[in-house]
Image (cartoon, rainbow, N blue to C red):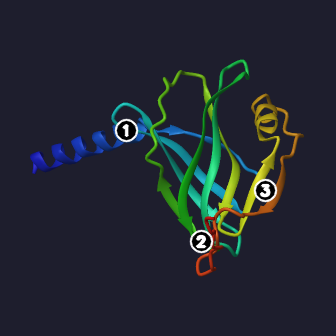
């Protein structure tokens, strides 16, 4: 009986240690994008961190990717850009999903720093939503200026053809 109690205490300690290695990430929500992030964290892997997101699709289109920026903000409010990446995934219309991107993020976490994530672009086969002047909006947000609302531009996606659509034939002379 005492061995079972000791095993449970050991398992609880390992669970708390694994959870404490994750870093919470603040999300700068862009309301005009069809993708919302409910939770974001950096999960410690072998020698780096992996980005874990809980996503929600508020459109009637299947989403296939996003581009994001991740910054650190020091105690003086100065942002420093860590990464700007594009990641692929599949999220059906009006669905939610939690996923972890396998692209490693290497940096040394320091006490007193905040991590902020902003989605800059959302991609479906039919459309691309792009945040105009995303870097300026993220820098203003990081410095505490919440008055600069990001503007989103939606354009047709001429690269990723919808499934089932005939592809144009290119003839070589």
Residue 99, disc: none
Tell me where residue 104 appears, x and y as whole percent.
45, 38
Quarter of the image with the C terminus in it: bottom right
The answer to whether 17 is drawn above or below residue 4 in the figure is above
> Which comes before the other along the chain, label 2 or label 1?
1
Residue occupied by mark 2: 95
Which element type, helix, strand or loop, lies under badge 1? loop
Packing grade of label 1 (10 A; few <14, some 14-19, many >=20) is: few
From the viewer's side, name the closer residue of 39 and 139: 139
Residue occupied by mark 3: 31
From the viewer's side, name the closer residue of 118 and 128: 128
Tell me where residue 90 appears, x and y as whole percent.
54, 65
Name which quarter of the figure residue 152 lies in. Answer: bottom right
Please name the residue shown 75% across and 58% down the image: 129
Tell me where residue 142 appears, x and y as whole percent.
75, 31
How much space separates mark 2 and mark 1, taking CA atoms? 28 Å
From the viewer's side, name the closer residue of 170 and 18: 170
The answer to whether 114 is drawn above or below residue 59 in the figure is above
> Which comes before the other along the chain, label 3 or label 1?
3
Residue 45, disc: 1
From the viewer's side, name the closer residue of 153 and 51: 153
Q: Residue furthest front?
A: 173
Packing grade of label 3 (10 A; few <14, some 14-19, many >=20) is: few
């Amino acid at each position: 009986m005492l061995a079972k109690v000791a095993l449970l205490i050991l398992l609880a300690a390992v669970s708390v240690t694994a959870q404490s290695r994750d870093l919470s990430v603040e999300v700068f929500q862009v309301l005009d994008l069809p993708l919302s992030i409910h939770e974001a964290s950096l999960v410690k892997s072998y020698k780096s961190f992996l980005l874990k997101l809980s996503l929600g699709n508020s459109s009637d289109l299947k989403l296939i990717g996003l581009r994001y920026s991740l910054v650190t903000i020091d105690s003086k409010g100065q942002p420093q850009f860590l990464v700007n990446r594009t990641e692929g995934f599949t999220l059906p219309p009006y669905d939610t999903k939690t996923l972890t991107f396998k692209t490693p993020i290497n940096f040394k976490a320091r006490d007193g720093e905040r991590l902020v994530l902003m989605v800059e672009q959302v991609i479906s086969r039919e459309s691309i939503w792009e945040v105009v002047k995303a870097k300026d909006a993220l820098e203003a947000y990081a410095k505490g200026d919440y008055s600069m609302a990001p503007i989103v531009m939606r354009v047709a996606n001429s690269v990723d053809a919808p499934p089932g659509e005939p592809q144009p034939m290119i003839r070589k002379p």
